Amino acid sequence: MQFINSFSKITNIFLVLFFISSCGGDKTIKEQAEKVTPISIIRFEQDLIPADTNLVNAAFFNNLNIKYKTFYIGYCENTLGLLPQINDPDYAKSISGFVKFEGIRFLKHDVDSVFPNLNDEEAALSLAMDRYKKEFKNASVPQFISYLSEFIESQCAYDSIIGISLDMYLGKDYLYYPENFPGFMRAKMQRNYIVPNTLKSLAIANFDRQLKDKRFLAYMLFEGKVRYFAKKLLPEINDTLIFGYTNKQMAWCNESESQLWEYIIEKKLLYQKNPSEYMRFLTDGPFTSADGIPQESAPMIGTYTGYKIIENYADKSGASLEEIMNEADWDKILKESKYRPK
């Protein structure tokens, strides 16, 4: 199997398209968002970490618990790893220590500096959620809450809540990210990834129950559906942000699509049930590390192929987004997609 190593021509074309999209995207989103129901992102980190530490006491945390309910408990237990008994004296002592810790307050200051407001994100989510309500007739729009995870996670989900960890989007050159964060990871820790990542988190939260089938086919198509969901709800977002690719990586995938499919078939990966044999094709990295795949490849090439199959299935079947997201017969999707890239 020989993959394409030269992509200068397609890269130049892609860069032109990317430039056009980047220049007009934000203005288009804001103009359209003015016509739909506005979405607000609640700033939990601002409530949790007040400027005046004298306000931090048992009553303060009790009020947070009343206001944020499920999110507050989930945040304390899962993100901070605190005791689940919120009335326990040790619990109040632990969370007070976190809120008053100098490093956290310094991080909060940096987050406030980068994100004095979330107007752009709220406009994009307003537009996306308007489409979401039209596509999913019985679905409720989730509540969006921002918070600080101290670099633990980018997003979280609790019931009908999607959390956005703003400290994971301070820019690729932020000085205080942990030293063990690799370059490919830092490159995606930027503000323009917030909305696509949030939409993908919503898709995962709503449909991850479908992942009972352990075959590569199922995981590949599920990851493809997650990207398709984000793309349909906000097509204004550039594909590079949805896939987490550089311009060259996106171009490489588009140019190598048929070779990728041929590789998957030749290696008999589709029906492989052992995750150790296929997770490298779904895991992020600087490239896809596998025999026969060049280092100029994109990471997660299985996700890209899964997306293309879902896209074909949508075109061939005429199914709505809701029908596509609810369809968990992976063999049916593959068969009816008639996916044969040339």
Image (cartoon, helix red, strand yellow):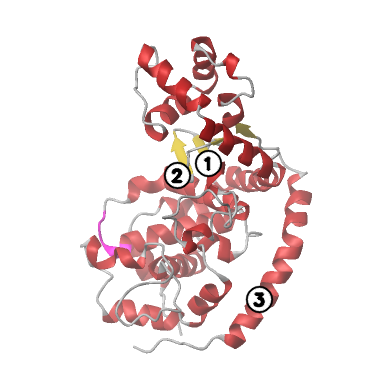
Name the mark nearer the viewer: 3 or 2.
2
N-terminal label among 3 and 2: 3
Range drawn in magenta: 213-217
Is 323 or 110 nearer to us in this picture?
110
Q: Quadrant of residue 288?
A: bottom left
Residue 320 at least partly seen: no
Is 56 or 249 nearer to us in this picture?
56
What mark, if any, has residue 54 been given in the picture? none
Q: Disc 1 marks which residue?
A: 165
Q: Residue extending furthest left?
A: 274
The residue that appears at 70% across and 76% down in the rendered structure is 16
Dot 2 amino acid type = Glu
Q: Residues within 10 Å of mark 2 (few under 14, many from 20)?
A: some
Q: Disc 3 marks which residue?
A: 15
Name the mark nearer the viewer: 3 or 1.
1
Q: Disc 2 marks which residue?
A: 153
Our reading of the magenta stretch's main secondary structure is loop
Pointer 2 with pointer 1, Cβ within 8 A:
yes
Label 3 SS: helix
The residue that appears at 73% across and 46% down in the rendered structure is 33
Q: How far apart are labels 3 and 1 at the CA level?
A: 30 Å
Q: Is residue 83 above or below residue 241?
A: above
**Residue 215 is covered by the magenta coloring:** yes
Q: Position of residue 148 (x, y in %)?
A: 52, 37
Q: Position of residue 221 (x, y in %)?
A: 38, 62
**Residue 92 is covered by the magenta coloring:** no
Label 2 SS: loop
Label 1 SS: strand
Dot 3 amino acid type = Leu
Q: Is residue 194 above or below residue 88?
A: below
Dot 1 amino acid type = Ser
Q: Is residue 309 above or below residue 214?
A: below
